[in-house]
Amino acid sequence: MGRDEIAARIRDLKIRRGALILAHNYQLGEVQDVADIVGDSLELSRAAASSEADAIVFCGVRFMAETAKLLSPGKTVLLPDARAGCWMADMVDVPGLERLKSEHPGTPVVCYVNSSVEVKAHSDVCCTSANAAAVVNAVARDRAIFVPDMNLGAWVARQTGKDLVLWPGWCLSHVRILPEDIERRRREFPDAVVMAHPECHPAVSAMADRVLSTGGMIEFARKCGAGRIIVATEIGILHRLQKENPGKSFIPASEAAVCPNMKLTSLESLLECLENMETRIEIDGPVARKASAAVGKMLAIR
Ligand code: CIZ
Ligand code: SF4
């Protein structure tokens, strides 16, 4: 079957199943192109919750589909490839978090959305890269525990002036972008503006003109006057940036910033998912209640 034929089958089956297809900004271009909505994890979870659809197909990684399920417990939430996890989310578990909490009694815990539902259930409030500074400002008098991304945490600490106890976790895809890559790109394209994701190494974020979540990057690219933008994040976002801004050019800071988990979803696995209505995301009641509270608190802060 050709790509166009698979895409046509997906569109047809989606209607028959009453499903909404969501795709994260880091998904393959061909997957983004068949999605109803492309966005960051929070935008997509909100879209899932406000949609009339009975089934949500979340083209992304597991923690994103879990967040959508927390916000839409009555809906069927499907992840096309059950193996699509997140290395960063796997770097913190509940016993480790509880140990850190016992070393800092009474200190509120802020967990990045890139975490398991169990870790969320043991945290006070969740955040995304789009609202991390606002969340930390809202919950921390002067200190908070921040898990699992130490690079995002370090950036938030600088933005807010708060004392953050950082978990030693990171994104293996984002740390592949090196300060030398930014230097090289700036030499190649001296007129370009640099935008970096806060999951990048602090030395990379410090070199950027703007440090932004993927949603922030989409907005900045649309509004900014520069014709050339160097992009320091997972390269899947370039598809959407280029598609929405045909008059501007987007240069990856490094071609090595690829998330293999994000690339597990293909047109083939998406079609199979709609055919079999699998893999369904299910979350245990007590864990779901506590994790939803942490996500709900975040939504109230915004
Ligand atoms: O929250 C998301 O979608 C992630 C993982 C990154 C971002 O900045 O959008
Ligand atoms: Fe996880 Fe990094 Fe992939 Fe995002 S890009 S899903 S943080 S491994």
Image (cartoon, rainbow, N blue to C red):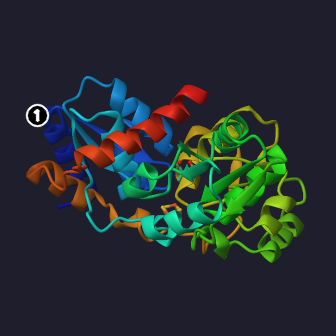
**Residue at label 1?**
16
Q: Can residue 226 be seen in this view?
A: yes
Q: Quadrant of residue 273?
A: bottom left
Question: Are there few (<14), some (14-19), or many (20+) residues within 10 Å of tag 1?
Answer: few
Vertical arrangement, residue 173 with respect to residue 122, above or below: below
Q: Where is residue 7 in the image (x, y as percent from the top left)?
A: 25, 49
In this picture, is 116 found above or below 70? below
Residue drawn at (71%, 42%) of the image: 140
Q: What residue do we see at 16% from left, 31% from top? A: 18
Q: Which residue is drawn at 65% across and 44% down?
A: 132
- Asked whether the viewer can see residue 195, the reply is no
Is 110 on the left or on the right of 182, as rendered?
Answer: left
**x and y, in percent, of residue 64 in the image:** 40, 50
Q: What residue type is labelled 1?
A: Arg
Residue 166, percent from left and from top = 68, 63
Residue drawn 12% across the image and 36% down it: 17
